[in-house]
Image (spheres, rainbow, N blue to C red):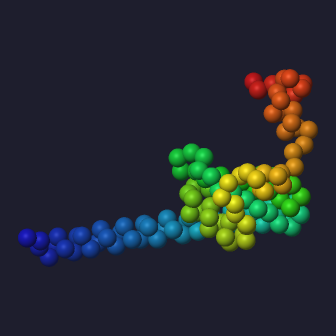
Amino acid sequence: MLSMADTQQADEQTAVGAAAATKDEKRAGKRAARLARQIRAFADSHGGSAEGQLAHIARGSVRIALVGANGEWGNLVARTYDEAKDAATQAGLTLHDDFDGDLAAKVRTGRYEWSRMAGLQLGGPANA
């Protein structure tokens, strides 16, 4: 049978857990807002708009692949899928399910990317 002290201790632990969760949510919200600013800055500097795709890349990391209206591309990394999705929503980023088809066709690659993809065959930098 639970005593009054046991009930009070359980209530205190629940309150501490809730406060920690709220603090974590605030931190995640701040990180998402920072990512959203970076997404908007990318879009503004690459034709005024951008599209993207979210992908898990490692334990605790999600890649936000970005493609600007001018075909330039880049990546950002979020800690969680929810954080990445929140940042994309805040920035007004159009999200695609996959990085293929329409989205991949918009990517403009330059000489550097082609030389890196071909490696030494075309005189590109070595993968040392």
Q: Nearer the viewer, residue 97 or 72?
A: 97
Q: Is residue 45 above or below residue 73?
A: below
Residue shown at 89%/63% (left/top)? 47
Give residue 25's position: percent from left, percent from top.
Answer: 51, 68
Is 96 on the left-hand or right-hand side of 3?
Answer: right
Give residue 69's position: percent from left, percent from top.
Answer: 86, 61
Residue shown at 67%/70% (left/top)? 89
The quarter in which the N terminus is drawn is bottom left
Is 24 on the left-hand or right-hand side of 89?
Answer: left
Give residue 7's position: percent from left, percent from top.
Answer: 19, 74
Q: Residue furthest left?
A: 1
The quarter in which the C terminus is drawn is top right
Give residue 65's position: percent from left, percent from top.
Answer: 72, 54
Q: Is residue 103 above or below residue 28?
A: above
Q: Nearer the viewer, residue 119 or 126?
A: 119
Q: Quadrant of residue 91?
A: bottom right
* Residue 80 visible, this orientation: yes
Q: Quadrant of residue 68?
A: bottom right
* Residue 41 visible, this orientation: no
Q: Nearer the viewer, residue 92 or 95?
A: 95
Is 21 on the left-hand or right-hand side of 107?
Answer: left
Q: Nearer the viewer, residue 48 or 29?
A: 48
Q: Residue furthest front?
A: 101
Residue shown at 31%/70% (left/top)? 14
Residue shown at 29%/72% (left/top)? 12
Q: Is residue 82 above or below residue 117?
A: below
